[in-house]
Image: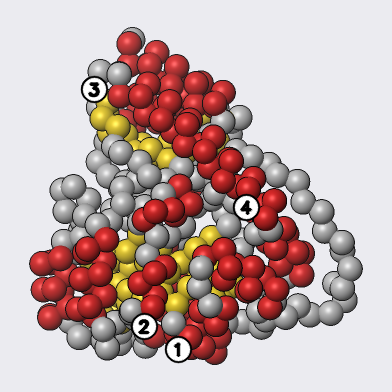
Amino acid sequence: MSIEKLAREQVQALTPYQSARRIGGSGDVWLNANESPFDNAYTVSGQGLNRYSSCQPASLSNAYADYAGVDTNQVITTRGADEGIDLLLRAFCEPNQDSVLICPPTYGMYAVSAENQGIATTQVPLTADWQLDMAGIDTALEADASIKLIFVCSPNNPTGNLINRDDIEALLTRTQGRAIVVLDEAYIEFSPEATCTDLLARFDNLAILRTLSKAFALAGLRCGFTLASPAIINLMLKVIPPYPVPVPVADIAEQALSEAGLARMKYQVLDLTANRAYLQAGLSMLPGVEVHPGFGNYLLITLDDADAVFARLGRAGMIVRQTAVANSLRISIGNRDECEKVLAFIRQQLSE
């Protein structure tokens, strides 16, 4: 028997998430992973590494709770927001019995993580304007009592739009006592007024995913957070692996969440927001290009022959992202020089 046949059936059939690094490519302009172009420097003492770290370092939990405006017992630190997804699935879904609901086009790891654990996925696509199909979700909930988690991303990846807050509140109301609404706010620093952290006081079935990978420019640190009721946090703590927060990670994360670190993050967000506006204006002037409003650190564009433009960009060393949206490219917001290069190249391609 082959090694592959010894693996779980779900793993044998699983198509892994196509991360930016898994897809690869070569170039000097990387605008495919919604990373920050800012390479901020940090110092690490390097001491205390002979001891295991705390499961949840109190100083880090307090720092993020202060930043997010929640109580410390409403915070769990994870290895990126992706581990938060995994922990919620482990805590609330029985394999081969329960299911989750997703609203594509959206972040692919919700479905991949569920499939990896033998958890079925129900899909209710977003509407034509990329909002929640509330009637469709109601129908799905009525038809399937096994739905335990509902994933919503705002700003949504890859479309870039914000999900209507009234719909999020209505969904939380309808699912109280039967399902957890998982709101992914990975990009919320680019639209801080749209956060739903205040709803944690009203809804014990809300879990909010956060990360330091985007606006904080710490994608390589792998540090994320889930904000939720103490009941949800305590359940996640039951299934989290031991020592999930390495000492150097906690050290750097606390520096990022300090007064100086937060000031730097907000300044860099302003810079990236200006670059997004520059790129959006320039692309909007090109014939045949539709630029969709973006509220994160990326823009989704649709255009004829998107596959060919994507390939030509790659050959020129400019790496962007193809998405499940037809004829589309998602372009992360880089520094001004990177935005100028990509804009000039696409302009040239469309003029030939």
Residue hosting label 3: 288
Q: CA gap, disc 2 to disc 1?
A: 8 Å
Q: Which mark is residue 231?
A: 1
Residue that protrudes farthest toward the top in the picture: 352
Upstream in the sequence, badge 1 or badge 3?
1
> Measured from the top left, where is residue 140 in percent x and y?
15, 74
Upstream in the sequence, badge 2 or badge 1?
2
Upstream in the sequence, badge 4 or badge 2?
2
Upstream in the sequence, badge 4 or badge 1?
1
178 displayed left or right of 135: right
* Amino acid residing under circle 3: Gly
Q: CA gap, disc 4 to disc 1?
A: 29 Å
Vertical side of 303 occupied by 32: above or below: below
> Measured from the top left, where is residue 109 in percent x and y?
42, 62
Camera-near label (1 vs 3) is 1
Do residues under tags 2 and 1 come within 8 Å of each other at their CB atoms? yes
Q: Nearer the viewer, residue 340 or 312?
A: 340
Q: Quadrant of residue 173?
A: bottom left
Which residue occupies 50% across, 21% down? 340
Which residue occupies 82% across, 58% down? 44
Vertical side of 178 occupied by 70: above or below: above
Instruction: Give SS at disc 1.
Output: helix
274 displayed left or right of 155: right
Q: Which mark is residue 262?
A: 4
Q: Quadrant of residue 17?
A: bottom left
